[in-house]
Image (cartoon, rainbow, N blue to C red):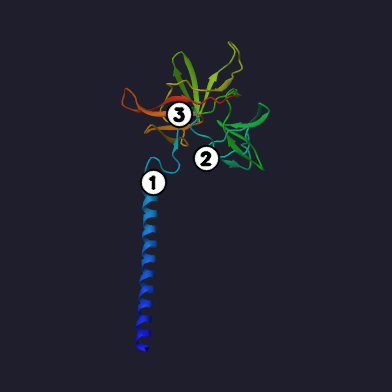
Amino acid sequence: MKTIYRITGIILILVSFLGTNTIQAQRSEDKRSRGTNTHRNYNTKQSVGTNHYRGDRYRTQPIHRNPHYRYPRRHRVIRTLPRHHVRVVYGGLPYFYYAGIYYTVYNNAYVTVLPPVGFRITVLPAGYTRLVVGPSIYYYHSGVYYANTSEPYSDEQKYEVTHPPVGTLLKTIHDDAEEVVIDGKIFYDYNNVLYKKVSTFDGNTAYEVVHVHKENK
């Protein structure tokens, strides 16, 4: 009888041991599987961070400190405004402008925002790019397009934030432009403008405006 109990105990220990090893092996396999899937997804075009165009809306700003402002994807917060900034109230909202960058109040500091269409400045930021599109001339800086709206023969210059026309070509686009996939093709989105990479007649790379998302007022 003691021998039978002893044999039964050994069998139970072996079953428990084998069951534990099987569970641990399964867990290890699951971890390896999850790790492989994460790595594979990260290296595909549809990985986290890639957005897909739907209808006429292809991206929303990821932060909404105030629903009346638009924020760049990589917002910047500063404690003190640049010394020679200009304060402008547009649409009842305060903006602080300096060297092509726009800020507004955020808590006890200032955060970068994108200027609305119609916003006007009197001096273009240093380093702007002059663009000739058909009969029109535009000025580009930090993802923002301007048009000269000065009165003829006026000494006061006025430059208004505007939408670029489809077909506008840039040599480079903003560093924060986000890659999006539409019907398997790669495009780039920044400040409500969608670009595609093209080759110019001289063999260089450029970025062409293919869509402008105009927000409803």
Label 2 sits on residue:
74
Q: Amino acid at mark 3?
A: Leu
Quick check: marks 3 and 2 in contact, CB under 8 Å?
Answer: no
The mark lying in front, picked from 3 and 1, is 1
How far across and down, in percent of the image, does residue 175 sit?
A: 46, 36
Label 1 sits on residue:
41
Q: Earlier in the sequence, mark 2 or mark 1?
A: 1
Query: Which image quadrant for residue 66?
Result: top right
Label 2, label 1: how many angstroms apart (C-alpha)? 23 Å
Label 3 sits on residue:
194
Q: Amino acid at mark 2?
A: Arg
Query: Which is more toward the observer, 182 or 125?
Result: 182
Query: Which is more toward the observer, 167 or 171?
Result: 167
Label 3, label 1: how many angstroms apart (C-alpha)? 24 Å
Q: Residue furthest top?
A: 153
Q: Residue furthest front?
A: 1
The mark lying in front, picked from 3 and 2, is 3
Query: Which image quadrant for residue 194?
Result: top left
Q: Residue at x 53, y 24 (%)?
A: 214
Image quadrant where one finds the N terminus: bottom left
How far across and down, in percent of the image, does residue 51 sit?
A: 45, 37
How far across and down, in percent of the image, does residue 167 sit?
A: 42, 21
How far across and down, in percent of the image, does residue 178 sit?
A: 45, 36
The answer to whether residue 171 is above or below residue 111 is: above
